[in-house]
Amino acid sequence: MSKRDYYEVLGVDKSASERDIKKAYKRLAMKYHPDRTAGDKDLEVKFKEVKEAYEILSDEDKRHKYDQHGHAAFEHGHGGGGGFGGGHGDFSDVFGDVFGDIFGGGRRGGGGQRQQRGSDLRYNLEMSLEDAVRGKELEIKVPTWVSCKPCDGSGAKAGSKPKTCGTCHGAGQVQMRQGFFAVQQPCPTCHGQGQIISDPCNSCHGQGRVEKTKTLSVKIPAGVDTGDRIRLAGEGEAGANSAPAGDLFVQVHVKDHPIFVRDGSNLYCEVPIGFTTAALGGEIEVPTLDGRAKLKVPSETQTGKMFRLRGKGVKSVRGGAVGDLLCKVMIETPVNLNDSQKDLLRKFEETMSGKTSKYRPKEQGFFDGVKKFFDDLTG
């Protein structure tokens, strides 16, 4: 009897993607598997047909040969390998590839030790604004797990080797049937490692790693800000039994500065000025990260006015132009006045008597608004 076209068996087009083929196979295998069809021979034949079609079309090389030569590519003597094993086998074998991501990453080859990559670590680094803006190379001390030198990370005493676990045969997992599904679980004998260490190393007691405080040199690039992370590949915890180490992430936190506040590439600061300078104008010195800078204050400057010094901010680690420094002037009211100074201020105030709108227009406008507000309430 001639075989049906494999694409027809799975109900997919010849242009179907690997994902479409796997999806169609899962649906049909669930439908026709003998564990669900109560010994129906016709459905068992369909199941074998579906399984055979999937084994060909899910393999890129076999699929290419099939597209060129059809079923003849896999007949005896054609060079494609002979046929497929009979019987439907264990249900978990059928779905090992389809459900591998659900049941713990699929099956392993016999005798291979399961390697669990070491954990990533985070180091919280506090630094000053100046160091963050300019960049700095510094040393940090990180407590972590490192590979054990006497056993070279294997966990076994020198001269001995770990043995393949006899329960899971090195897979690190065993299958537990739960009703219709077969679920993979860590092997209870080797605890998921795939190997048994009968003669453990005296230094690490079979773990393949020991605790140690490492001193690392970290180069902080110029322009970093709070929240930025610097990744040091392979400087995290060493994995057990010679597994690769994780990574270390240096998390930057810039400490509050007594003068400046950073917002992206810009810096902000408040600059107090005297009453006379604000009224008459003048030149003042303001701080920058590069030293002092001159700032001209025009006459009649009001408190809260913002002045921009271009290019005196920060160049971000992500690139772009250097930001600006924005200085907010705050007029400081004189304190600790003596009697003579107070008398001079009173005489000065008398010179403006009755001319509030001319000399203090904002004050006059505010009280005019207050008066109108109360007039409207009583009206």
Image (cartoon, helix red, strand yellow):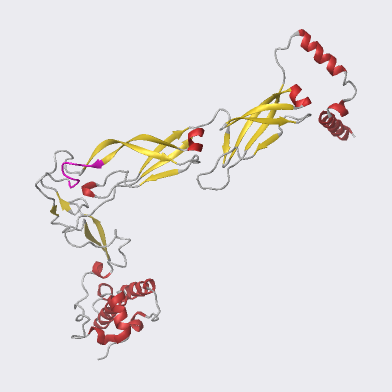
Instruction: Please tell me in which quadrant of the rendered image residue 79 appears.
Output: bottom left
Q: Which residues are magenta?
A: 146-154
Q: Quadrant of the N terminus?
A: bottom left
Q: Dividing the picture into quarters, in which one does residue 291 lie?
A: top right
Q: Is residue 151 magenta?
A: yes
* The one of 212 and 89 positioned closer to us in this rendering: 212
Q: Is residue 3 above or below residue 136?
A: below
Which residue is more in the foreground, 293 or 93? 293
From the image, give the main secondary structure of the stretch colored magenta: loop
Give the residue displayed 36% in from the left and 38% down from the top: 217
Q: Is residue 281 magenta?
A: no
Q: Is residue 58 left or right of residue 296?
A: left
Residue at figure coordinates x 21%, y 50% from the top left:
191
Horizontal relation, residue 12 to residue 213: left or right: right
Q: Nearer the viewer, residue 292 or 330?
A: 292
Quadrant where the C terminus lies? top right
Q: Residue furthest left?
A: 159
